[in-house]
Image (cartoon, rainbow, N blue to C red):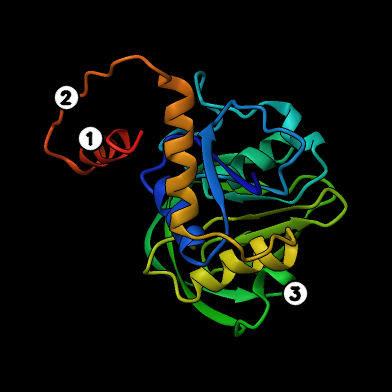
Amino acid sequence: MSLVILDFGSQYTQLIARRIRQMGYYAEILPYNAKPGSNVKGVILSGSPFSVYEKNAPKPDNSIYELNVPILGICYGMQLVAEKFKGKVAWAQKREYGYAKIYIDKQDDLFFNIKNENIVWMSHADRIDKLPEGFETISHTQNSPYAAIRNLDKKIWAIQFHPEVSHTQNGNIILENFVSRICGIKKDWNMSDFLEKAIYDIKQEVKDNKVLCAISGGVDSSVLVVLLSNR
């Protein structure tokens, strides 16, 4: 396992993994409260429809901050980081949904080979009103003073926008910068590796038992039937 994406219920979580896998890096999606093992080289915190200050808002296990690996918070993931380290997250008077222009304030590996002004896709009703101690701004928009932040000592980066969607200019470059330049993960994965692993995992789980599989007509169940037929 190289890169873990913790899923907090965002509609874009699968897309984050897809983008990274298409680049040739292995990424695995885990539930938001999972405890990644020691073989993880980086963690991404996905977005979410929740607000971090809500009573039942999903929160990651604190052990992720003790792995000593780079962490990237995206949207809700950014707000989780801010709350965890005693920043202030509040309802934004002006919700951002749609295109926005970010201005890069400081050089950083996350924005390597990217111009100082970029168009990104925002989708949030909350914002950071106060940065946690030890964090600094590396990018802003006209409406968001903290469009991207970092804490180099803790190896944490966080962004308010969504790099995984096609609307974000240079979004793939940002993701690859995090995976490759910051996490140091090598480009050595392809879809055939996934198929072999999926079939192996099914064999280990099913063994000699019989399987009853209902097909809805959708992609997920159809792919599962194909995988099962190879066991």
Q: Can you tell which quarter of the image residue 34 is in?
A: top right
Q: Are marks 2 and 1 in contact (CB under 8 Å)?
A: yes
Q: Quadrant of the N terminus?
A: top right
Name the residue furthest front.
Answer: 208
* Disc ID at residue 221: 1
* Disc ID at residue 106: 3
Q: What secondary structure is found at the residue carrying circle 3?
A: loop
Q: What secondary structure is found at the residue carrying circle 2?
A: loop
Q: Please, what is the three-letter code of the amino acid marked with disc 1?
A: Ser
Q: Can you tell which quarter of the image residue 62 is in?
A: top right
Q: Is residue 101 left or right of residue 187?
A: left
Q: Please, what is the three-letter code of the amino acid marked with disc 2?
A: Ala
Estimate the spatial distance between the alpha carbons at disc 1 and disc 3, rounded to whole Å: 46 Å
The percent coordinates of residue 94 (x first, y second) are 43, 53
3 or 2: mark nearer the eye: 2
Q: Which comes before the other along the chain, label 2 or label 1?
A: 2
Q: Quadrant of the C terminus?
A: top left
1 or 3: mark nearer the eye: 1
